[in-house]
């Protein structure tokens, strides 16, 4: 029974993720709109980096090395979610880079980045 419930929760998380991405690429009138490369990179970054939340498994080193350049590209192009994600990943490795990316995300209105900077004692 427990395995069945866990499987159902996993499938629900996957559906929520897929639905979220689908909603992002639809225009107001329900017609698919062309998505710029930056948004595509942001979606790929989000989908791949969300693996742990969806499946409970961490990215392998190889998976991370494959998706990291896409995340950086998305962040550099102005994708706010990727800016925040890159900043959060840098927190453990390079405080200056973390502050840089979190500041960019906060300047673009990302509330998570704003809160993280406040928690670090940094205000814009």
Image: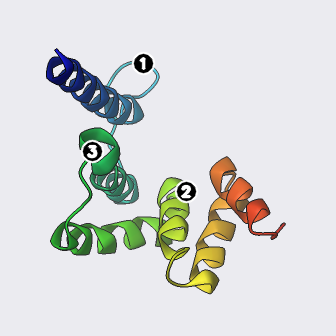
Q: Which residue is mark 3?
A: 56
Q: Residue at x 61, y 82 (%)?
A: 95
Mark closer to the observer (2, 1)? 2
| Circles 2 and 1: CB atoms closer than 8 Å | no
Q: Where residue 61 sits in the image (x, y, percent)?
A: 21, 73
Q: Disc 2 on helix, strand or loop?
A: helix
**Which residue is denoted by mark 2 in the rendering?**
80
Instruction: Give neighbour class at mark 1: few <14, some 14-19, many 20+ (Cα, 10 Å).
Output: few
- In this rendered view, identify the residue nearer to me: 18 or 38: 18
Residue 51: image location, x then y, percent: 27, 49
Please state which of residues 7 and 101 is positioned toward the viewer in this rendering: 7
Q: CA distance from mark 3 to mark 1?
A: 35 Å
Quote the CA–CA distance across marks 3 and 2: 25 Å
> Mark 1 falls on what kind of element?
loop
Q: Nearer the viewer, residue 28 or 15?
A: 15
Q: Residue at x 32, y 27 (%)?
A: 19
| Residue shown at the point (41%, 72%) measured from the top left | 72
Answer with mark 3 or mark 2, whichever residue precedes in sequence: 3
Drawn side of residue 9 relative to residue 60, left or right: right
Crowding at dot 3, Cα within 10 Å, few <14 / some 14-19 / many 20+, comes out as few
Name the front one of labels 3 and 1.
Answer: 3
Disc number at residue 107?
none
In the image, is 97 to the left or to the right of 18? right
Q: Report the quarter where the N terminus lies.
A: top left
Q: Where 56 falls versus 94 (above or below)?
A: above
The image position of residue 30, as x and y in percent, is 36, 19
- Residue 36 position, x and y percent, is 36, 53
The mark found on residue 29 in the picture is: 1
Asked if residue 122 lies left or right of residue 19, the reply is: right
């Amino acid at each position: 029974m427990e395995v069945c419930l866990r499987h159902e929760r996993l499938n629900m998380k996957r559906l929520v993720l897929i639905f979220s991405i689908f909603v992002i690429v639809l225009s107001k009138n329900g017609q698919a709109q062309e998505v710029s490369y930056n948004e595509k990179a942001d979606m790929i970054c989000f989908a791949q980096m969300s693996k742990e939340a969806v499946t409970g498994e961490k990215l392998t080193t190889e998976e991370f090395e494959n998706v990291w350049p896409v995340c950086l590209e998305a962040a550099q192009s102005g994708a706010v979610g990727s800016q925040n994600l890159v900043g959060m990943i840098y927190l453990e490795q390079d405080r200056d880079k973390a502050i840089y990316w979190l500041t960019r995300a906060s300047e673009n209105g990302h509330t998570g980045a704003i809160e993280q900077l406040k928690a670090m004692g940094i205000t814009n």
